[in-house]
Amino acid sequence: MGFFSRLKEGLTKTRQGFFNKIENLVSGGKKIDEELYDEIEELLIQADVGVTTAMELVENLRKAVKERRIEDASELKNVLKELIKEILRDEKSALNLGGKPAILVVIGVNGVGKTTTLGKLAHNLKQEGRKVLLAAGDTFRAAAIDQLEIWGKRVGCDVIKHKEGADPAAVVYDAVQAAKARESDVLIIDTAGRLHTKTNLMEELKKVFRVISREMPGAPHEVLLVLDAATGQNAISQAKLFAEAAGVTGIALTKLDGTAKGGVVIGIKAELDIPVKFVGIGEKIDDLKEFNPAEFVDALFED
């Protein structure tokens, strides 16, 4: 099965929850009036596109209907598809791998699939022929170090680690030195799951960034925030707060296959203008893929 087919399958719940309802709403010779616009806006909000984004989309839909003199409600689905593609059009999903090594820091709250996403990302980069090193910067949980080591063995990457409870900044320092000495192409740093509300943990993250930029000017090259698509609007709230504290450069959105809240991708782009760089649509090692906006919208709207 190709990735588009898997993406389409993964977005089934979102499509059934919103886009099929839109289809039903605009079919059957319905009149284009305020009541119809209100119903479309409500469905957009239910799909976790976000209130602000839903209102803007419906306003742009109104304008398009007026400018194009559309009278058949069934045409609204395609106009909506165009408008969503327009929001996502400028997504820059390619990773910045310009450093030698390129340093990627992976952040997020507990339970979003952060270490798993990191492992799958390492696999993708190895498949491209890059030499990848991993750093166990989550020293709060012994299980996190063990989990990263399992991923390291699975994808064929060495892991730089200290013991549980060590200073994460010290682990990162050693990892940067090792990546330089071993001429690694990419260093991916795992970090402790942290709530954006915990000041001490956010300060610790800033310390990690200071060590990285001191040892490798211009780094980190990417700060990837892992979000669970199933949390919907809460994912947008997390992204806002992490963006302020940690200079997020891209988002990896996991668990798209298990949720009806896939519309959150649209809200993240519209409200925050942080690119969604990867989407996760399953448990397999190759189920993390670079985000393709056109494919995503097509998969949402296809029957």
Image: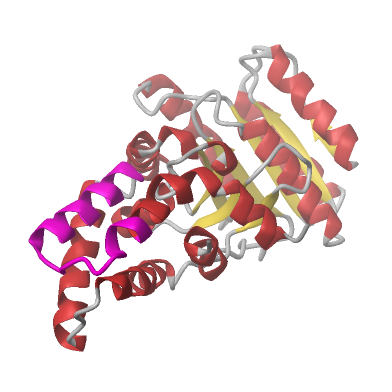
Q: 231 or 239, which is in the foreground?
A: 231
The magenta region covers 23-47
Q: Reply above or below: 12 against 57.
A: above
Residue 91 belongs to magenta span:
no
- Which residue appears at 75% of the width and 61% of the height? 2
Most common SS among magenta residues: helix
Q: 240 or 215, which is in the foreground?
A: 240
- Which residue appears at 43% of the width and 72% of the height? 89
- Which residue appears at 80% of the width and 48% of the height? 123
Q: Is residue 104 left or right of residue 27?
A: right
Q: Is residue 70 left or right of residue 128?
A: left
Percent x, y of residue 196: 38, 29
Q: Is residue 297 left or right of residue 51?
A: right
Percent x, y of residue 126: 84, 53
Q: Quadrant of the N terminus?
A: bottom right
Q: Reply above or below: 276 against 10.
A: below
Question: Which quadrant of the figure has residue 149?
Answer: top right
Residue 41 belongs to magenta span:
yes
Percent x, y of residue 230: 47, 35
Q: 72 or 260, which is in the foreground?
A: 72
